[in-house]
Amino acid sequence: MEMNNWDTSYKNSLMNESRLLIKINAILNIIGLKNYSFNSISFILMAFVGEFLIFKSLIVKFKFKNPKILFWSLVLFPSIFLWSSGILKEPLIILSFGLILNSLIVTRRKKWINISSFIIAALIIFKVKFYIFICFFPALISYIISEKTKFKPLKIIFTVCAIIAAIIFAMGKMNNSYNPLKILSQKQNDFITLSELFDTGSAFKIIPIEPSITSLLKAIPMGAINGFFRPFPNNINNFLQLFPLLENMLLYLMVLYLLLKILFLKIKINQDVKNVLWNSLFFIIMLFILTGVSSPVIGALVRYKVPGLLFLIIVINLMYDQFKKHPTK
């Protein structure tokens, strides 16, 4: 049987990002008698369950003073709301994040429930969006190590970064399909080719990456600028593209404001909160740089950043909660 989207134009030996989504839709077609609305509502429900699990887990661990702000910011933030409201991969990723955080934070008598939830969620992320897997799990491992050992998060993060760099350097010498530098170079080339073939109206130039460490290092600074700050005002071609720009400005101004408040009031942040803050930022930085390096289209860039925005909202809520709990605010 022929299926138009079973194989993608971009393939490698590690994953095919579309097949799990197709299988889930096939199952939902049987249950919902091929009703598109049923499938769409099912995916929206997956995203909401994931957001609720994230919310519930953080409330259990940190006892937020204003939990409603956390809940509604997770559910109604425009980019997250948009990209989790349809038959897309994002609802599966958000559900997986919720399952992982819930399995790590919420204790149960039957430990196999937490273990199985963690494994299933990890496999979903691996199969659906491999680039998120390679950004999220180093940060998650760093978080778990710091949580169990009480080592300072920054020390663990720097150690994990050194290990990642060593792995990339070693695998970059390989002449096969597992070479991460070749995979990234090919992925970027596919994006550039597609943006040239189809007039997206929101394409921008990025630094081409060759399969070498030197080329990757040269591309990282501009990749970070793209990932964190695009779209720029001169990239705005229609009303809808204005929203990501406003979101960026709002989020970064809030981070700056809360950071200055915390420093000015000399608020002491406990180790558990620091661990989540630093490792969330670790994930956000890796994801935004990777997407900024590889995607030359504003629409795709905004979409691929959604998991990072989710954790950026968590960071802002944690900072705000620390500020609100301080007696001399």
Image: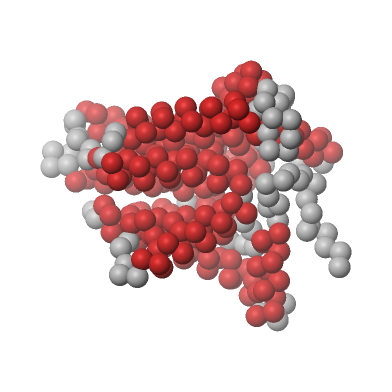
Inspect this view and state whether residue 300 appears: yes
Residue 226, above or below 56: above
Please report the residue visible at 83 percent of the width from the left and 63 percent of the height from the top. 3
Please report the residue visible at 56 percent of the width from the left and 53 percent of the height from the top. 125
Residue 162: % across, % down: 47, 27
Closest to the observer: 43 or 220?
A: 220
Please report the residue visible at 24 percent of the width from the left and 55 percent of the height from the top. 63
Closest to the observer: 5 or 249?
A: 5
Which of the image's four quarters has the N terminus? bottom right
Residue 38, above or below 192: below
- Residue 207 is drawn in which quadrant? top right
Please report the residue visible at 19 percent of the width from the left and 46 percent of the height from the top. 325
Residue 135: % across, % down: 52, 40
- Residue 187 is drawn in which quadrant? top right
Residue 57: % across, % down: 34, 58
Residue 48, above or below 311: below
Left of 275 or right of it: where is 49?
Answer: right
Closest to the observer: 43 or 169?
A: 169
